[in-house]
Image (cartoon, rainbow, N blue to C red):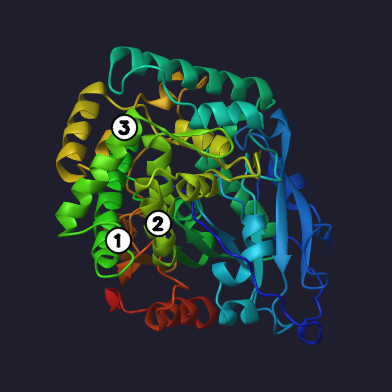
Amino acid sequence: MTLALTGCVAAMIPDDTRPTPGPSKAPVTDGVPADLLPFYEQTVDWQECDGADSGLYDCATVVAPLDWDDPDAGEIELAVIRRHADSGEPIGSLLTNPGGPGSSGVELIRDSAAYATGAALRDAYDVIGFDPRGVGESTAVRCLDAEEMDAYLYDLPQNPRGSAEWEAELDERNAAFAEACEANSDGILPYITTDQAARDLDLLRAVLGDEKLNYLGYSYGTFLGATYAKLFPERVGRLVLDGAIDPAVSGLEVGTTQGVGFESALRAFMAECLAGSDCPFRGTVDDAMADLGTLLASVDARPLQASDGRQVGADTLMTGIIAALYSEDSWPYLTAALADALQGDPELALQLADFYNGREGGVYLDNSTEAFRAYNCMDYPVADPAEDVASEALLAEQAPTVAPYWSGPDSCAVWPYEPTGVREPITAEGAAPIVVVGTTNDPATPYEWSVSLADQLASGVLVTRVGEGHTGYNKGDACVDDAVEQYLIDGVVPDDGLTCG
């Protein structure tokens, strides 16, 4: 599975430093087919955002075709937020995407602009966040209410893991989830694809008045950006793709490679944990991993009871572990959560799992789980069962701690629509240089995918961050930050193969 990027709370800019917004530019419609002109010619009606700093942010809704291949088939809405350049004199718009698929770009920029972009980018650009089709405040995928989502994500299977009965039980759950998505999403599911979303991205570029797309995409956002470059290479401006997904690999290979990546990140965490005084594990990294495996098996057999009545089994504990492995900043929380779990207290681990699932106080704050499923089930062809067997064998060999809680029945096998996506290399011949940033021990988008995407792209340029965690820009490495910002602001292309850290 492809996992979502986490965020943080953005710092507020003092009143006396707020920029004065300039006039909006006219839409760019050169080369647009006649049947699409009504969409490309629309004027964006910017309004003050709810819940955002007045004068610094404004929000709008842009109307897009439900189906770009049939513009008369209906319409959807795209939610957009603009953070005005601190300089008051933007060089253009910088569109951003935080990943997922299913993460809200509006929320990222409204609440965490300093996480998404460094100060230099916020000074130079109007930074644009948007919720892709199917996500958040845009026309969204809807499936389950909070109580039903709790049952889907947290309820323990009634049958032993790996048994035929267990697989049948999970198949039934997945089918019920898919049926709910179809019933509650008002007919949009066939059009929740990255290809359609990339066409939306071009619409946003045009109505913002930019001749070419300047874009910073993280995680899944790299696939969205690469797809844009495939469809519109002549409209590529300055693209940075950080934490890349390889567009040529299958969904099964994505899941397998990520499982191995999280095992590697977990070993790195254990090495640091063992060097500290508060680590609940002892001995070597291998010893600690074996003890963690024992804990997971124990919780799988005898789930821990949380204070709110939920039972925390091995799957939920593993979700909490994965959530914390996205960033080294979260490793102390993981240390504390595992120490508590070893003492029979699951509260911290459950908090981490809830954070990953977007759950707070019994409420789901977004629809990221539903949108994630919708995109992946349409973007990735269903795996061959023979490949599934080989994948499980590879996971068991290379990720023995993670593997027992990683695989299960293919949730997309019961999706109500056949996938339309293809998995193939993207070259984007004719595009301007595209900078790809990869982190060497990134668990969610392993480094090898960034290397592969940079090699595929005819104009790809690879920047390597040596380190831990998901994505590389704005993570405290001045070398990476300088390379990204000099390109996006001044057009200075980094040396291909630049290594930082």
Please give the label number shown on residue 324: none
Where residue 376 appears, as percent x and y from the top left, is 46, 36
Assess whether mark 3 and mark 2 are in contact (beta carbons under 8 angstroms). no
* Quarter of the image where one finds residue 10: bottom right
Viewer can see residue 430: no
Q: Residues within 10 Å of mark 3 (few under 14, many from 20)?
A: some
Residue type pointed to by label 3: Ser
**Which residue appears farthest toward the front when viewing the image?**
343
* Quarter of the image where one finds residue 275: bottom left
Q: Residues within 10 Å of mark 1 (few under 14, many from 20)?
A: many
Q: Earlier in the sequence, mark 1 or mark 3?
A: 1
Residue type pointed to by label 2: Leu
Q: Secondary structure at mark 3?
A: loop
**Which residue appears farthest toward the bottom when viewing the image?**
16
Please give the label number shown on residue 407: 3
Where residue 495 appears, as percent x and y from the top left, is 31, 79
- Residue placed at 57% from the left, 31% from the top? 150
Q: Count how many numbered circles sit on residues in the image.
A: 3
Q: Secondary structure at mark 2?
A: helix
Q: Nearer the viewer, mark 2 or mark 1?
A: 2
Q: CA distance from mark 2 to mark 3?
A: 22 Å
Give the position of the N terminus as an image quadrant.
top left
